[in-house]
Amino acid sequence: MLEEERKYEVDENFTLPDLSATVPPGGRVVVLPPVTLTATYLDTADLRLARAGVSLRHRKGDPLPWTVKLPSDVPGTRHEISRPGKRRETPAELTALVTAYSRGADLLPAAVVRSVRQAYELRDGADRVLAEIADDAVSVLDGDRVRSRFREVEVERKGGDGDLLDRVEAVLGEAGAVAGGFTPKHVRALGEAAAGAPDLVAPTDLPDKPSAADVVTNAIRRGVGRVLTHDPLVRLRQPVGDDDTAVHQMRVGSRRLRSDLRTFRSLLRPEWVGPLRDELKWLADVLGAARDAEVLGARLHVTAAADPLSPLDPAAVDRIDAVLTQRHERALTAVDEALGSARYAALVEALVAATGEPKLTPAARERAQDVLPKLAAKPWRRLADGGKGSDAAADLDPLAPDERWHAVRINGKKARYAVDAVAPVLGGGARKLAKSLSRVQELLGEHQDAAVAATTWLEVAATDPTDHALAVTAGRLAERERASIRAVRADFPEAWDETTRGSRTDWLP
């Protein structure tokens, strides 16, 4: 669940103002009975979770006492996952969710916080809860002794919108409440050490005249961040947006980071970058099986519904769907096993270390503008002019086998990732080329998805030659996929011509 919350600092004499004007007509403010909540927060000895904006707690007084809170891409929000359980028995599922941040270190009690809470619900005319306001008198405990005290007000969005929270903030501000940012209670309780920098170093703004080292380091940090922030969402089977999944994003992060390490390999020590790329390939392959099953499952229903005037046998479609669902579940089980392995734990440790101190060669000290065009030129030439097997985009024959188109797709992905990596610094033509390559890659990706799908539908039918309805349905599905392939091959020459037009490639040596 995505939790949206705003916090406000108030002094001990603060009086909560009348909030009735913030609710819609017919709404009301409901005063809830006061409660006392005692929360024990777990963390590593060096407070890795707190410094990363993550928490794992047991809170006495909650119906689901164990809760993990994780960072979110949406400002002012966190992912909140709660489970039942006894205080001394941390749910294994929640311990696994913080793996990317704890990196296997022991999780021990780090802070105990007692909150005497007076809560209020803002409801609309239909009695729906729009927001909850919690006025907390907080005590930080050290055994039976109170080490410090503070008071804060939290406003959590429920069924309301952002405008409601803005109205509440205005009323609280007039009464003397001060927006306190998004500092959790346990971070305030733990003090300066918990507010330190996280071990996973984030990208920074590049200087006006960056070195190649600046660009490489930022690319590594960006890639590692993309992989590890999706780790807990993969474990939760959580979607990312309306039409994407965490498995997809974590796989893309792994593959893009591996590609960046390849693009910048002349700037990185080979004994360091080689093993790291090997482990990223392993991770991407494990995630790839689950992602492929996701894509096929979604594609089946789109292809089956492509022609409403010529419907397919629904029972046969359901049978194919059942096969794909089984594949998907098996692949997700393999992902869970991989993420719970010692091999993955070692990879996480290596990735976090890479964000702090990538192993660079002396060549990385040179100016980015002098180095980067050469690095992007090699994968571009392989795509444009062909490598082994002459897998050049310009030479693609509309009648060439699917494997040839797939080989060009692989070269296209490498070129696109390389240009993407240098475009923020080189700008101009590099940005235009990156955009054009995105379109090329979109077409080649559709080609590959359709080719794999057509083969899959026929393979499923072949498992039961006696089911004639299944065979006919699979054949019709495969023909629709071949039609998609023909459409891609017809559109590709124009897209490739646009990619090589104008100033898009002038910057390449």
Image (tube, grey):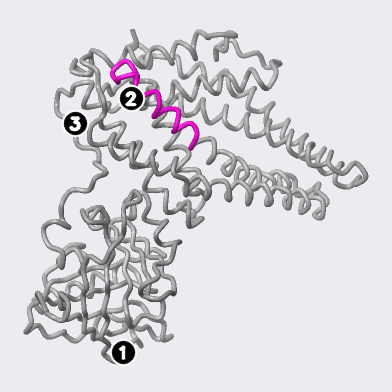
- Which comes sooner in the sequence, label 3 or label 2? 3
Closer mark to the observer between disc 1 and disc 3 = 3
**Label 2 – label 1 distance at C-alpha:** 60 Å
- Amino acid marked by disc 1: Val
The residue closer to the viewer here, 253 or 46, is 46
**Label 1 – label 3 distance at C-alpha:** 50 Å
Report which residue position mark 3 lands on.
206
Report which residue position mark 1 lands on.
30
Whether 446 is drawn above or below 210: the answer is below
Pointers 3 and 2 in contact (C-beta within 8 Å) = no
* Residue in the picture at 51% in, 25% down: 440
In the rendered image, residue 392, in percent from the top left (x then y), is placed at 55, 12
> Which residues, given as a range, are shown in magenta?
265-283
429 drawn magenta? no
Among the 4 quarters of the image, the one containing residue 380? top left
Report which residue position mark 2 lands on.
272
